[in-house]
Structures are given as structure tokens and as C-alpha cells.
Image: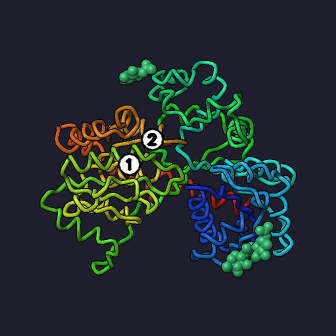
Amino acid sequence: MSNSNENKKHIAVFPFPFSSHLLPLLTLTINLAHESPNSHFSFISTQKTNQTLFSKTNIPKNIKHYNVSDGIPKGDELLPGSEVTFYLQTGPENFQNGIDLAVAESKKPITCIIADAFVTPTFDVAKTLNVPWIPVWIPMSCSLSVHFHGDIIRAHCSVNDVNRTLDFLPGLSVLRVEDLPHDILMTGTEKENVLTRALDSLSKILPEAKTVVVSFFEELDLPLFVEDIRTKLKSMLYVPLFNLKPKTTPQNEIDESGCISFLEVQKAKSLQVVYVSFGTTVVEPPEHEIVALAEALEEYGFPFIWSLKENLRNLLPNGFVERTSTRGKVLGWVPQSRILGHGSIGAFVSQGGCNSMLEGISNGVPMIFRPYFADQGINARLAVDVWEVGVIIEGRVFSKNGLLKSLDLILVQQEGKRFRENALKMKKILEEANGPKGRATHDFKKLVELVSSS
Ligand SMILES: *[C@@H]1O[C@H](CO)[C@@H](O)[C@H](O)[C@H]1NC(C)=O
Ligand SMILES: *[C@@H]1O[C@H](CO)[C@@H](O)[C@H](O)[C@H]1NC(C)=O
Ligand SMILES: *[C@@H]1O[C@H](CO)[C@@H](O)[C@H](O)[C@H]1NC(C)=O
């Protein structure tokens, strides 16, 4: 094989430029670009992506950004969530335009398309160009099964059947209707939208993909689900796109938020600090839940760190911050992995995004979940009923009493010890999965081979 041949590889990458999807795909692209230095990568997304993330990240020279239209009509007021609709509605033509820009500038034809699986119109583009299509599934792996079996789920279950278990799905009997992403039951109703239709089409198009990349660890996955989904796809590769390794922290790294020195002071009450964070999510808890959380934290009396966006802080009860200031901190951005890895956190209150959940587990911290949307319900269910590392808050909504009960269970009762032991077991499994012998290392190499030979 000659080098000049290798030089010709040109991979177009299409992220889903919303919420927690964008960064994982950029991370994947950067990792691939390092491993495949002779390939050329075109990261095709909206201009906003370039402004907010791309041009602020250290990007290898063999990745270039090209922008496509975000589809937002000029002058219209944007309803929450409508950006997604506008973007997907731009359709294959828009994504083809991005490719045309990339090809015109690089003078290299596209040899492969990697796309966030949510950007389904890129499947048509790949078909037209007759190049391999490699979708990347960012949410929890087993939620793929839920999208493959949407029809069966809708035939068996209604929204009100909250406790109905999904025992008719291979390997997923632990899941319940209340855990499902809401869009599953919306498809075919008047609440259906472009995204729900896109996700519903996955059962038809994913089997045609060269391979499907899932951002998770096979070592943690549900064996029967894995067996079943593998029969449906040509190939599936586990390439986790989470940043779970805490950055090695030099002794003198500045502690801008003051969190770490705060935790040092709390050390005497080791394993009793409560850490609350809703991550970088787009869905914000309503006022009554913020108030309930604050009241529970105030009444409970244990130390806490609460990462809360500036715009939500005015919802806190009057004087809350002052009254709890000797044992609590309410902050904006905090160094989450350093906090969870500090060794004094006794409970992590979270929405259950995949990244946060794994960050909790990989630090051996028991968790309290309040799932809001997307795969959060599924993540929480796995953590609670399969790995047994925490609880879902009573009623799945923050209430003062519900939270007090959960905190008591984890920080005071024996239950907490059991959760912590399980989390520490999971931590070990994760460490091995992340290591040189893990499936992830093997599968990433396979992906590199695929894109540099396709
Ligand atoms: C992306 O941002 C960089 C730096 O701001 C700029 O030079 C470049 O032209 C932008 N590219 C696109 C396609 O918007
Ligand atoms: C893409 O980025 C360039 C800057 O590099 C800008 O001039 C152009 O208007 C952008 N196009 C779209 C469709 O946003
Ligand atoms: C679902 O189960 C929970 C606890 O097992 C129970 O409290 C609740 O009433 C049930 N909901 C319905 C609608 O059956």
C-alpha cells in the first residue's frame, strides 16, 4: 500500500450540535485524527459549533471545520427545542452542501461519513456518494434496542402504564415504561416531531451501516441486549467517548471555585458531603424542585456542594445561601471529577446523564437520581437495579421528604455502605474496561482501520 493512497482518505464528520452530543463526537474526531494522521477529516456543523467549541479547542491540523445552515428562519423567535427541528429539517441537501465545500477546498473526494446517529439525513448522503456510513450512538447503548422495538413498545404499553416492565425486549426486563425516553411513545401521535421520526427510522437504517459505534463499555453492558443487537447490525464497536479519567492534578493547581479546600475542611466528616449537579443539561428543573432540594439540604445539616447555574439561583429560598454558608457551597461551574474523586463525597444527586453517572461510579460514589429526559431514566434504572449503586428519588421528582429519605438511606443507613461497595466494584470493572485489554481499546483500533481503509 502506498502512502499516496492513504493520503486520499477524506472522512466527513457530522455531529448533532446540541446539548451533550457535540463534544463526544469532536473528541472522537480528534482521537481518530491523531491515530490516522494521513487522513483528512472535515467536521461539518453549524457556524455556532465553530464559534462555541471548535475554534476554542486544540484541533489537529488534519481536521477542518465547514459550516452548514442551522435551518433557523431569520427573524423568527425560537421556541425551546426548535433548533433541533430546524436543523434536522434542512435535510440531506444541506449536509451535501457541507460536503461540497469540504471537497472543493481539499480537492479530496469523501471516502467515509461518520455521523451522530441522530443526524439521520446523512445516511442518504452516504448512499448517494456510495461511501460507508458510520453512525455514532451517544446515549446509553441499550436505548438502541428501545428504538429498534418502538412498534412493539407502543403496541404493549401506554404512557400511563408507568410500572409496566419491558420484559418483552431481549435483556431489558429491568426497564419500565417510566424509564423510557418520552419520544418513544410520542411517535405516531400528534406530539411526534422531526427528531422522534428520525429516531424511529433508525431501526431501518442502522442495519445498513458499515458499523455502529456506541459510546459505552461492553464490559458494563447487558449481555442479552448485546447479543440481540449484534444480530440486527452488520457490526457494532464500543468506543466510549466519556472523559472519566480525572485530570492528574498537580498539587498546586488552582482551586478557583474553592471546592477542594472546602472539601479538605470537611474531611473529618468523610463520606458525608452531598454533591448536587444537573450537569450541562438543557432541561432545567422547575422552581418547586429547586426549592425542595434547598429545603432538604438545609434541614439535613450535612455539608454540600451544589453546582447550580447562575440563572436558577434566584429561585433558591430567601437567605438559603447565607444560612448554610458554613457547611454548604452553591457555585456555577465546578471541577466535577476532582470533587467526585476527592474521597469525601457521600452521595451524588444527579439527573443521570451517562457521563455523570459513569463519573459517579468510576469514583465509587453512591447516587441519587432524578431523571428528566432522553436516556436519563434508563441510565438511572441500570444504576439502581442492575449495578445497585443508588436510588431513584421517590416519585421521580424532587420533594423535600423524598430527598431526605434518599439521603438518609445512603448517608446514614447500611444501604449506603452496600451502594458504595457496589460502586467500588463497578469502578474496578471500569478501570479494566478503560485499560489496554479492554474492549474499547480493541474496538477503537478497529474503527481507525475502518476509516483509514474504507
Ligand atoms: C471557524 O472559526 C475560525 C476561528 O474563529 C475561523 O478562522 C474560521 O473561518 C471558521 N470557519 C468556519 C467554516 O466558520
Ligand atoms: C460559514 O462561515 C463563514 C466564515 O468562515 C461565514 O462567512 C459564512 O457566512 C458561514 N456560513 C453559514 C451558512 O453560516
Ligand atoms: C408504580 O409502582 C409504585 C411503587 O412500586 C407505586 O407506588 C405506584 O402507585 C405505581 N403506579 C401505578 C400507576 O401503578
- Residue 319 visible, this orientation: yes
**Which of 36/276 is in front?**
276
Q: State the mark number for residue 290.
A: 1
Residue at the farthest top position: 156
Q: CA distance from mark 2 to mark 1?
A: 14 Å
Q: Which mark is residue 199?
A: none
Q: Judging from the image, what secondary structure is the residue with disc 2 in? A: loop
Which quadrant is the C terminus positioned in? bottom right
User: Measuring 61% from the left and 48% from the top, which residue is drawn there?
Assistant: 137
Q: Which residue is mark 2?
A: 371
**Residue 450 placement (x, y as % from top left):** 68, 57
Left or right, residue 276 beside residue 46: left
Residue 201 at x, y percent in the picture: 73, 37
Which one is earlier in the sequence, the residue at label 2 or at label 1?
1
Seen from the viewer's position, the closer of residues 280 and 174 is 280
Q: Position of residue 448 (x, y in %)?
A: 63, 61
Q: Amino acid at mark 2?
A: Pro
Q: How far from the left and from the top, in percent, is residue 369?
A: 38, 42
* Nearer the observer, 330 or 271: 330
Name the amino acid, label 1.
Answer: Ile
Which residue is most to the front? 318
The crowd level at tag 2 (other Cα within 10 Å; few <14, some 14-19, many 20+) is many
Mark 1 CB within 8 Å of ligand 3: no
Residue 6: quarter of image: bottom right
Residue 394, image quadrant: top left
Using the image, determine if residue 200 lies above or below residue 309. above
